[in-house]
Amino acid sequence: MGKVYKPISGKAGKPFFLDRICTQVYSADELIYCLGENPELLTVDMFGKELCQWLEEDCNAGELAEMIARLVKSKADIIKIVTALLNSAAFISQDEIRRIVKIIKDEEGSSEFDKRKARGDFFLTKERYEYAIREYETLLSTLNNEESDRVANIYHNMGVAKARLFLFEQASEDFLRAYDCNEEPIHYYAYIATLRFTLTDRDYVRTIGNDAKMREVTLKLEEDLDNAKKKFLESPEYTDFLNKKEESKEGGRYAFCSFLDMKLNEKKEEYNKYVY
């Protein structure tokens, strides 16, 4: 049986938004857990007056707020601040604290570019696409064309973020820029994929018709799309849809419409999460 730990604070009436991690936390415990999960993104400026005020007034964690304020006032570095916070949480072991501190120390040797790139990639993997795009745009403004591999990687990742926001035309431009930098096949494949989603069938066929390279990539793309479609048709989500649809034929039309509305609202909320 697992251990039971006394929480540091109760649940706050309003969440606190950790901008660098792009996450809302609702308690002191959740704050500390979140810091431990993302050590490579932490900076001293995260621990300002607003956080301390939230801990004291909304979480009733005055001692923790006072400790943070004292450390910041003494100009403690990020390792000292994070170590003190982690030690205040009984659910984090000393081995885990040492692991987290090591990651922070390793990150201290990273360049500002690497840190910002890591942050952009973090937002991308966490499906916070607007935040990822902002980071990548800032990085691109600091690079020159001689750093072709770096530029290509950033343009590609930015294209992925835009494609997942259904901004396919913008994404296609980014993928093509990435390919122009270092001619990696993955960039060209992504470029063709965005054309597939933006052009009509007639325009798409006309575009690739006279280009042997495009036709070759298209064959691989169509094979991947067929496999993706097959996987979806075998998924529990699609099976559930078919069952609800079949029930509607037997007089359950209202229930089926409610089911579709629920699924549509879920997709809307999911999309809003990516943007806001």
Image: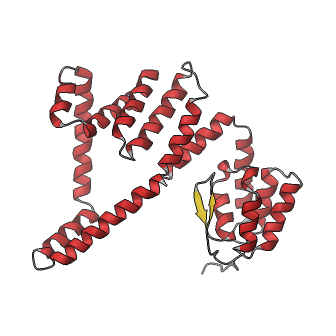
Q: Residue farthest to the right?
A: 74
- Residue at 27 percent of width and 29 percent of height: 217
Q: Is residue 184 visible?
A: no
Residue 150 versus residue 165 in the image, above or below: above
Q: Which of the 4 image quarters holds residue 223?
A: top left
Q: Which of the 4 image quarters holds residue 62?
A: bottom right
Q: x, y (%) of residue 222?
A: 22, 38
- Residue at 61 percent of width and 54 percent of height: 21
Q: x, y (%) of residue 149?
A: 52, 25
- Quadrant of the image for the N terminus? bottom right
- Residue at 26 percent of width and 54 percent of height: 231
Q: x, y (%) of residue 121?
A: 54, 43
- Residue at 89 percent of width and 54 percent of height: 74
Q: x, y (%) of residue 104?
A: 72, 48
Looking at the picture, tell me which residue is in the foreground, 232 or 143.
Answer: 143
State left or right for residue 123 relative to residue 230: right
Q: Which of the 4 image quarters holds residue 2?
A: bottom right
State left or right for residue 48 relative to residue 205: right
State left or right for residue 172 relative to residue 66: left
